[in-house]
Amino acid sequence: MDKVKVAINGYGTIGKRVADAVSLQDDMEIVGVSKTRPNFEAKLALKRGFPLYVPENKLSTFKDAGLEVSGTIEDMCREAEIVVDATPGGIGAQYKELYEKSGCKAIWQGGEKHELAGFSFNALSNYDGAFGRRYVRVVSCNTTALCRLLYLLDNEYGVKKVRAVLMRRGADPGDDKSGPINAIVPNPITLPSHHGPDVKTVLPHINITTLAAKLSTTLMHMHAVNVELSSTATAEDVRTTLSREPRVFLASSDMKSTAELVEFARDSRRPRYDVWENIVWSDSITVEENELYLFMAVHQEAIVIPENVDAIRSMFELMDKESSMKKTNESMGIGTL
Ligand code: NAD
């Protein structure tokens, strides 16, 4: 069977990780990645063997910088059967017309609105719903983590009500423009934060309210989650449920912080110290009168990457949910921590 031809529009934090993950699959291949500036990431893309495409008005800039360019972003979209749009939030919407014209499918990321694609995706929660679709949005890092967790809990025990406080990283580690900040910023001050409504784009029946604040850190997000369960469960039951899912990692208490989690991921030789799994502190799992409490860390740069791979398989109807998630997990080493 021919491999699905995938292009990455926006070879940044998310785009370069998706490109690497797609390259590990035997049923899809990268036919091009786009850059807007001839920086170190553009050079890296070429070094990794990815054909480089650029905006038409930047062709000479890249040429002057001595970088080999395969064509314009329009050319790239014509080469691709699907474009994974990983441009900054809000920019992706501007490309819809081009994707429409090129006849390719497209996946947007969580920075775009649900309405742009008309379908928001999380592999565990609604893989089948993306079957054959032309446009899909993979939800953001925090929403991905909440969807995975709540899907598992709802399936096993039923979920009555969720309250979650999200402590968000101020910026990504490579971002030298917007952080870290010397402040704790309610984000936003009014309730709810966008994460609760975003979970509902994937799991519409879940009753959830979220509050969020930005903190002076770049490493990971942290969630303090409280879930009212519909049926009786002990903390041990919940641990067993979560431990069965490879995309959830139960961390031990000797990893005392996000800093130590990152060190652990580095020592585990994860590429770019990426943790694709939800990280739930096992000892934080507590149940009191059918109310569950836990702490969960989320590696913002990594968690959505396997979801993009599974979304491609679903959109091309390549295989069922269990087979796709297993294939993605095994190729990337998910569930091995
Ligand atoms: P980023 O800024 O790291 O990368 C974006 C890339 O797009 C850069 O390479 C930039 O040069 C390129 N770009 C900018 N304007 C462009 C244009 N007009 N045309 C083509 N390329 C352009 O951004 P990111 O963090 O990778 O975010 C991408 C998307 O993923 C956003 O929707 C974001 O909300 C979402 N997301 C980000 C994170 C995260 O923590 N970084 C996590 C989950 C989802």
Image (cartoon, rainbow, N blue to C red):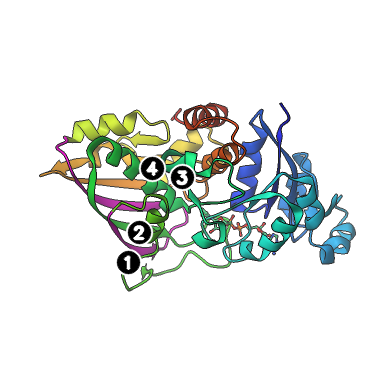
Residue at image point 66% right, 30% down:
27
Q: Amino acid at mark 1?
A: Pro
Report which quarter residue 288 is drawn in. Answer: top left
The earlier-in-sequence mark between 4 and 3 is: 3
**Magenta extent:** 207-233
Report which quarter residue 332 is drawn in. Answer: top right
For the residue labelled by badge 4, is the local secondary structure a helix, a strand or a loop?
helix
Measured from the top left, where is residue 235 in percent x and y?
Answer: 19, 36
Mark on residue 148? 4
Query: Please, what is the dominant secondary structure of the magenta stretch?
Result: strand
Between 103 and 162, the residue placed more toward the observer is: 103
Q: Tell me whether circle 1 and circle 2 mark residues in contact (CB < 8 Å).
A: yes
Mark on residue 192? 1
According to the picture, the residue beneath numbered tag 3 turns out to be 122
According to the picture, the residue beneath numbered tag 2 turns out to be 196
225 within the magenta span: yes
Q: Tell me whether circle 4 and circle 3 mark residues in contact (CB < 8 Å).
A: yes
Between 89 and 253, the residue placed more toward the observer is: 89
